[in-house]
C-alpha cells in the first residue's frame, strides 16, 4: 500500500511540477495510469503476481479485497490532492482554449 501512495504522489507531482512545460500527452498518460490502478483487472493481476493465486481464489474474496484496494487508492488520491491537480489542469486547458 505504500507503493500505491508513492505511485500516486509521483504522478500528481509530475503533473504539477512548477516550471515544467506542460505536456498534454504526459498528463493524459499519467491520469490513464492512475485509472489503471483503480481497475479490478489491475488488482487481480497484481495479486496473482504477488501471491501466485489470482485465478484460484473465489470471486467474493477477490471482490472484497479489491474494494479495500479501491478505498486505499482513494485515500492516496486524497492525500496527494489529485482532485485539485485535475481541476487545475482543466482550468489551464480552458484558459488556453479561451486565449486561442
Image: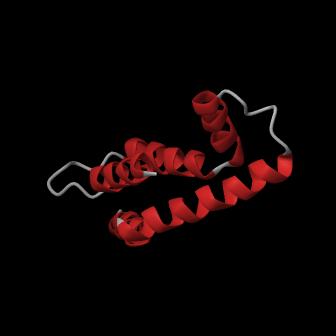
Q: Quadrant of residue 100?
A: bottom left
Along the line of sight, which residue is nearer the eye, 14 or 53?
Answer: 53
> Is residue 92 positioned above or below 6 on the image?
below
User: In this view of the protein, which residue sits in the foreground, 20 or 41?
Assistant: 41
* Residue furthest left as drawn: 19
Residue 62 placement, left or right of 7: right
Q: Position of residue 64 (x, y in %)?
A: 74, 58
Task: Return the x and y of residue 8 as percentages of the image width and height.
Answer: 40, 53
- Count of numbered circles on the image: 0
Could you tell me residue 77's position as x and y percent? Answer: 45, 64
Compared with 63, 99 (above or below) is below
Q: Is residue 36 left or right of residue 27?
A: right
Task: Name the residue: 39% across, 54% down.
Answer: 5
Residue 1: % across, % down? 46, 51
Would residue 20 appear left or right of 37 to someone viewing this image?
A: left
Q: Residue at x 72, y 30 (%)?
A: 53
Residue at 33% from the left image edge and 45% from the top image edge? 23
Tell me where residue 88 sits by quadrant.
Answer: bottom left
- Residue occupying image coordinates x 50% and y 50%: 34
**Against 86, is 22 above or below?**
above
Q: How is the image coloured?
A: secondary structure
Amino acid at each position: 500500500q505504500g507503493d500505491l501512495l508513492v505511485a500516486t504522489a509521483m504522478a500528481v507531482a509530475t503533473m504539477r511540477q512548477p516550471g515544467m512545460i506542460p505536456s498534454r500527452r504526459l498528463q493524459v498518460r499519467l491520469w490513464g495510469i492512475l485509472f489503471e490502478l483503480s481497475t479490478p483487472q489491475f488488482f487481480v493481476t497484481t495479486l496473482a503476481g504477488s501471491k501466485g493465486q489470482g485465478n484460484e481464489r473465489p470471486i467474493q474474496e477477490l471482490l472484497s479485497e479489491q474494494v479495500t484496494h479501491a478505498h486505499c487508492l482513494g485515500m492516496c488520491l486524497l492525500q496527494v490532492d489529485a482532485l485539485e491537480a485535475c481541476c487545475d489542469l482543466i482550468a489551464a486547458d480552458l484558459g488556453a482554449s479561451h486565449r486561442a
